[in-house]
Amino acid sequence: MASDFYDILEVSRGASAEELKKAYRKRARELHPDANPGDATAENKFKELSRAYEVLSDPQQRAQY
């Protein structure tokens, strides 16, 4: 990954689980493939966003990250 997961989600390193979820949902609406049909860049950013949320929303994975 080229970017930091916290930067992708646009949250601070100390963000709570609720802040992570809120940030993920906001960015997901913007980048979702259904909202950007045919836009490969948005699709790739959405996948990156999903991976960032997957890691940061899991306490064990977040601690390792």
Image: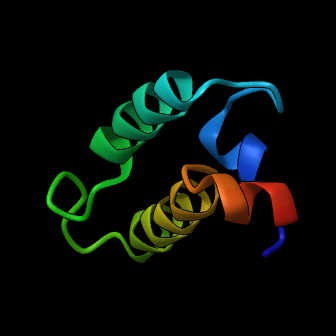
Establish if 1 lies above or below 11: below
The residue most toward the front is 60
Q: Nearer the viewer, residue 45 or 23?
A: 23
Residue 39 placement (x, y as % from top left):
34, 69
Image location of residue 50, percent across then percent down: 46, 63
Q: Is residue 33 visible?
A: yes
What residue is drawn where x is 24% and y is 65%?
A: 33
- The quadrant where residue 5 appears: bottom right
Judged left or right of residue 61, residue 65 is right
Q: Write the residue at 49% across / 74% down.
A: 44
Quadrant where the C terminus sits is bottom right
Give the quadrant of residue 36.
bottom left
Expressed as whole percent of the image width and height from the top left, the position of residue 9 reads 61, 41
**Vertical position of residue 60 compared to residue 8: above or below:** below
Apparent side of residue 65 relative to residue 56 in the rendered image (left or right): right
Tell me the residue at 76%/42% (across/down).
7
Return the x and y of residue 43 as percentages of the image width and height. Answer: 39, 71
8 left or right, relative to 19: right
Q: Nearer the viewer, residue 64 or 37?
A: 64
Q: Nearer the viewer, residue 55 or 5?
A: 55
**Quadrant of the rendered image containing residue 15:** top right
> In this image, 27 relative to 53: left or right?
left
Is residue 65 at least partly visible in the picture?
no
